[in-house]
Image (spheres, rainbow, N blue to C red):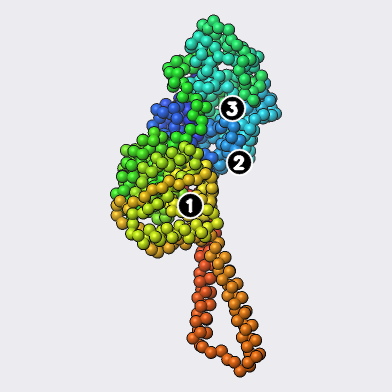
Amino acid sequence: MTDPTSHIRALAGPIIVPGATGFVGANLFHTIRAVRSDVYAVVQKEKNWRLADVSDIHIVAANLTDPAAVKNLVDVTAPKTVFDCVAYGAYSFEQDQQLIYQTNFNSLTAMAQLLADRSIAAYVHAGTSSEYGTNSAGPTEDAVCAPNSHYAVSKLAASEYLQYMGRTHAFPCINLRLYSVYGPLEDSSRLIPNLLRKALAHTLPAFVDERTSRDFVHVDDVSAAFILAAAKMNPTLYGESLNIGAGRKVTIGELADMTRSLFNIEEAASFGTMQGRSWDLSDWYSDPAKAERLIGWCAQIPLEQGLLDTAKWIASLTEEELALRSKKATQGKRRSISAIIACYKDEPAIPVVHRRLTETFTKLGIDYEIIFVNDGSPDDSAEQIRRISQADPHVIGISHSRNFGSQMAFRSGMELASKDAVVLLDGDLQDPPELIEAFHAEWEKGHDVVYGRRVQREMPWHWGLLYKAFYRVFAAFSYVKIPLDAGDFSLIDRKVVQWLLTCPERDLFMRGLRAYVGFRQTGVDYVRPERMFGRTTNTLSKNIDWAKKGIFSFSNVPLTLLTTTGLTLLGLSLIAALVVAVLRIIWPDIAPRGATTLLIVILMFGSLNLFGLGLVGEYIGKIMIEVKGRPRLIRSALIRHGVITDQTCGPAKQ
């Protein structure tokens, strides 16, 4: 393969590779990383085995199906070149139709719309030859596409969208329709790795029909195509789709014969004993002439050489390591948690929280991240978080421009969280991190939300009585079922988090919303200890505000009671008026006595009117907050790896 170094150096930076945990994305990232230091691997949750040796400095976690996370990714990295290798649905076991379209189309449009407002040099998208569907025998790029799977439909929609953006809006983008890519770092469940694993043991796997054909192209050639497309980006390429294949039709029978020859295998191949994928076709090969004409690319690594090269990688792995290098083997495992800590005047507690969380997650043996949200704290919390993040790459810090309250602190962390679940807890250590172990156990049993239930509080008895009274009044008034004595301390599954983030309110009451969204929920009992450091920031007036926030956010009962009271008093007034009228007819000289009674009645009705106006005013006040549409929160800085990065790209997602 021609050395791509000069073209890599010519790329505009910074460079990001969304989907870098995948086969093509990882190889492309490693190729560029060998030459450039301003390239970043974008992963959904965590780096996997393909990126195990990559420094966390070059890893950016972002759930690209979440528009808020996409915006933050673009704002933070400010990329000039994007190699979009994101895909879901190419494997037979990836059958979530909603996720196929969210990943392959919705995430692309969200990112492209943001990038279109910025000056970027190139957006290169990993398409697929599956876009041609049943018209798969050597089609040119302008051939009719007849997709025959949800994956193909989603990818074709993506290429059509990029064509529109490129030609209509001059967006510098190109779609590469990849054929049967193979090479080092490929998923071990795929054809070529499985074939070579058997070949190294001088045997052969089961094959599909020997007449079935494919177009095998080495991953190094594919990486070169991405790099050339970006380096040579110009208006004539905007919105184009290019076939990226070797242009060589290879039948499964020919592949088997080639493997037998290369690895001296005497065993005869067994064809027709393996079931193909539902969308597989007998002839599937490319016409790559347009790629050579427009960007000067053609495949240069012969299949024979590529098989030997890939076999060296296979030979370097043990059977156990090879088995773990399959996406199928890790599907469905929930292995990661994002802890989100709301910090306000908690500087001395932050190192203790970090230590206890780290010990808990290490004991559980799961991947994790710890997100400290400095919610406008007047102490030195930001510097404390910076020092910890410098020593521990699991730690991320967020600083707000002012104090927005713990509820917005939790939301801020949830928008950036990248793991399979989040745990919400206060930074004053009244929520014991060790309880996460019990949360995790319930989560593994299938519960989507696990909340801490405060069966006892280490505080004066009268305060405890008031808290218990609030939860019971709140539960009685609320139009959703509210668990008693359950605060914010909870573990929430990723799918529930995504629904919580779609709730638009600015006057946020997280524990109420958590009950509102539903799913499978359960509680874990615990005794809530006293604050370990400093004095509580809660006061009677703040607790009253909390009660008002909960009741007025999740209950119409006060308005109903006001209406009922008004109707009752109106009825009594009509009865009283009727009685007085009858008495005047019977005894004309009767006159009302008791000015005091009259005054009390007037005061009572006047107070009732004022109380009614106050109740209505509370609801109107909440409406006013929502309709103003101000930013829910403002992040002033992000803290990673000991570096504080000022956020100057505008408000958080509305």
Q: Whole-Å distance between the Cαs marked 2 and 3?
A: 36 Å
In the depicted structure, whether residue 623 falls above or below residue 195: below
**Residue in the foreground of this view, choosing between 36 and 652:** 652
* Residue on which disc 3 sits: 92
Which of disc 3 and disc 1 is earlier in sequence?
Answer: 3
Residue 169: which numbered mark, if any?
Answer: 2
Q: In the rendered view, tell whether residue 235 sits above or below residue 433.
A: above
Residue type beneath disc 1: Pro
Where on the picture, by quarter, is residue 627?
Answer: bottom right
User: What's the residue at 63%, 32% (across, down)?
Assistant: 150
Q: Name the residue under label 1.
A: 483
Q: Which one is closest to the eye, mark 2 or mark 1? A: 1
Res 122 seen here: yes
Measuring from the top left, give residue 177's x and y in whole percent: 60, 27
* Residue depicted at x 40% and y 55%: 403
Q: Specify whether residue 116 is in view.
A: no
Q: Reading the chain from its start, which is encountered first: label 2 or label 1?
A: 2
In front of the other: 4 or 370: 370
Marks 1 and 3 sit apart, C-alpha to C-alpha, by: 41 Å
Task: Indicate the quadrant where residue 146 lies.
Answer: top right
Q: Look at label 2 and name its amino acid.
A: His
In this rendered view, identify the residue nearer to me: 537 or 505: 537
The answer for how far apart the CA atoms under marks 2 and 1 are is 51 Å
Q: Residues within 10 Å of mark 1 (few under 14, many from 20)?
A: some
Left or right: residue 539 compared with residue 478: left
Label 3 crowd (10 A; few <14 / some 14-19 / many >=20): few
Tag 3 or tag 2, which sits nearer the N-term?
3
Occupied quadrant, residue 40: top left
